[in-house]
Image (cartoon, rainbow, N blue to C red):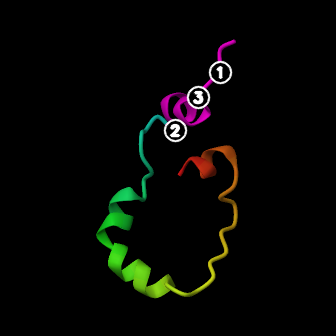
Amino acid sequence: MHIIDIPQFINTYIIKRQESLFTADINKYKDQLSGNIKGKSVLVIGGAGTIGSSF
C-alpha cells in the first residue's frame, strides 16, 4: 500500500514552496512577537484547513 505524504504533496503540487511565506517575518520579529503574545490567548480563524495546517 502506498501512503501519500500530504504535507509534501501540498508543498510540491499546490503551493509550490517548501516553507511558509511568513517564515522570514516570523524569524525577524520573533522576540517582539513573543513579547506581545506571551501569556495571552490567540484565536486563529481559517488556519485549520489542509493548506493552513501545513504552515
Q: Position of residue 50 (x, y in %)?
A: 67, 44
Residue type of the residue flagged with mark 2: Ile
- Mark-to-mark CA distance, 1 and 3: 7 Å
Return the residue at label 1: 3
Numbered disc 2: secondary structure: loop
Q: Residue at x 63, y 82 (%)?
A: 41
Discs 1, 3 touching: Cβ within 8 Å: yes
Q: Which image quarter holds the N terminus? A: top right
Badge 3 is on which residue?
5
**32 to the left or right of 10:** left
Q: Which mark is residue 15?
A: 2
Give the mark, 2 or 1, whose residue is nearer the N terminus.
1
Q: Is residue 9 magenta?
A: yes
Are there few (<14), some (14-19), or many (20+) residues within 10 Å of tag 3?
few
Q: Nearer the viewer, mark 2 or mark 1?
A: 1
> Which residue is depicted at the point 52% across and 32% down?
8
| Mark identifier at residue 55 | none
Tell me if residue 44 comes above or below residue 9 in the rendering: below
Position of residue 54 in the picture relative to residue 30 (left or right): right
User: Residues in magenta?
Assistant: 1-15
- Across and down, in percent, residue 17 comes to 43, 38
- Residue type at tag 3: Asp
Residue type at the position of mark 1: Ile
| Crowd class of label 2 (few under 14; some 14 to 19; many from 20; radius 10 Å) | few
> Which residue appears farthest toward the left when viewing the image?
28
Q: Earlier in the sequence, mark 2 or mark 3?
A: 3
Left or right of 31? Residue 47 is right
Instruction: Identify the residue shown where x is 69% and y is 67%.
Output: 45
Question: Which of the two residues, 35 or 47, is positioned nearer the viewer here?
Answer: 35
Front residue (pair 41, 29): 41
